[in-house]
Image (spheres, grey):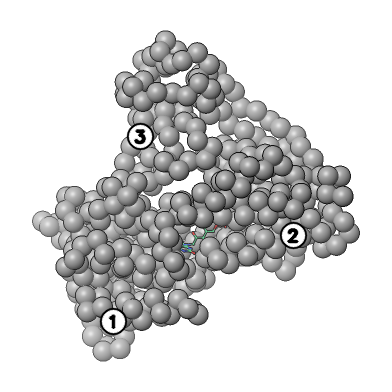
Amino acid sequence: MSMNARPILIIGGGVAGMTAAVEAAEVGHRVILVEKEAYLGGRVMRTHRYFPKMCPPACGFEINVRRIRQNPRIVVHTLATVEEVKGHVGNFEVRIRIRPRYVTGRPTLDNDLLERLTSERDNDFNLGMDRTKALYYPHEMAYPPLHVLDRDALSDTDAALLTEAAPEGAVDLEMTEEILTVKAGAVVVATGWKPYDAANLDHLGFGRCRNVITNVMMERLAAGNGPTAGAILRPSDGKPARNVAFVQCAGSRDENHLPYCSSVCCMGSLKQVRYLREKTDDARASVFYIDIRTVGRLEKFYQDMLADEQVEFIKGKVALIEEDTGSNDLILDVEDTLSRQTLHPRFDLVVLATGMVPNTVDTKFPDELVYDEYGFIDESTEIPGIYAAGCARHPCDVARTTKEAMAAALRSIQCQYGGD
Ligand SMILES: Cc1cc2nc3c(=O)[nH]c(=O)nc-3n(C[C@H](O)[C@H](O)[C@H](O)COP(=O)(O)OP(=O)(O)OC[C@H]3O[C@@H](n4cnc5c(N)ncnc54)[C@H](O)[C@@H]3O)c2cc1C
């Protein structure tokens, strides 16, 4: 029965998209998985560890990659975006644009040649906190396991070197973009989220004070494959951060920025306090919060942090962050709403807990979808044959994302046989 159905198109290859892909394919359906980056895994791949179990992101990812590799029913397109979706349930026509990778993977490239290249680019995987060669491996767990070339960053000298020294067929500098038109029976939108732009938070010093970073940057600092090999160092002088402030709701629950709660930032920061405490013995953390939201079993995580004498929780919204010019330390202006005192504590690093913005604010596909006022896909107006999962629908954690992805996979199958 399933072989007659058209493939399921999945837009986005993060946890949501990968889960929907393997679940649909393992019950016999063909899947086309379209990911705009050069690798699968989405935002979770950029975390150091993920709650509740504090596993490294490689854990779940490796299993999903194995399931994808072993399943001939799944076709993966990376560096790819969906340009258009037309039609109706059971019979969508989809146009996919695939950007050139310039690397074929056959034969593979050797490190000696890569070392000889001099052109570089900002490392977007590490949020621009370090640089890579223009021809780079996205990260150690990358799937597909292929290098990618940033053609704009490649100098003429390096282009000539590649032409001369790369094994025949390994690099194709003339590769062009490709447009594919495919048929699909159903569509899963799993395009996820991006961090709220902290540059909008001038009062909190981002961009103005060198030692103010965001929660997503903290994940990369703590990660062994990050820009500091896992050491939590101050950007201004590379010294270990020993006294760190975590500023909750940085722009969230704020009419001027993101009026909603992103639901994961409290747990995100508690997790990062734990990174700090585990990595630096005498480190101190202060968490400035409006409310701490740790539901269900996650409350235990919060209670453990409360019991740590090196961690303090101050109920109050930070009004201003200034930099001390000599030391690059940060001085906060905050009212402790419980004691009613105005405080001016000093820290050597500040981490802003910025919220999640749906990627659907930039790319609205398919046309028929309805979005809420913040750009998330409106859950109440689903269209037969088109389903959303994970952070494309609302801010949520990995556990909820995977459940929704399974549901979207199931509905994508059911709808092709008359159900919805
Ligand atoms: C600081 C922080 C820490 C967090 N830590 C945890 C944690 O410890 N535990 C936990 O459970 N959750 C955590 N989360 C939440 C977690 O990141 C999300 O639950 C998870 O990323 C949701 O997965 P997703 O697949 O919906 O989205 P994403 O991870 O964003 O994946 C979406 C994918 O779609 C791709 N894409 C986007 N647009 C397009 C397009 N137009 N075409 C093709 N592809 C596209 C993207 O490149 C990406 O690969 C954290 C969040 C934050 C902010």
Tag 3 residue: 132
Tell me what residue is drawn at x 21 percent, y 75 percent: 310
Residue at the outermost top position: 164
Looking at the image, is 280 positioned above or below residue 166?
Answer: below
Tag 2 residue: 410
Tell me what residue is drawn at x 76 percent, y 48 percent: 29
User: Residue 307 — which label?
Assistant: 1
Label 1, secondary structure: give it: loop
User: Residue 242, position in %: x, y?
Assistant: 18, 63
Q: Does mark 3 have its CB less than 8 Å from ligand 1?
A: no
As shown in the figure, which amino acid type bears the numbered disc 2?
Leu
User: Residue 139, position in %: x, y?
Assistant: 42, 41
Label 3, secondary structure: give it: strand
Label 2, secondary structure: give it: helix
User: Residue 79 — which label?
Assistant: none
Sort mark 1 into few (<14), some (14-19) or many (20+) by Cα contacts within 10 Å.
few
Tell me what residue is drawn at x 33 percent, y 47 percent: 226
As shown in the figure, which amino acid type bears the numbered disc 1?
Ala
Sequence-earlier tag: 1 or 2: 1
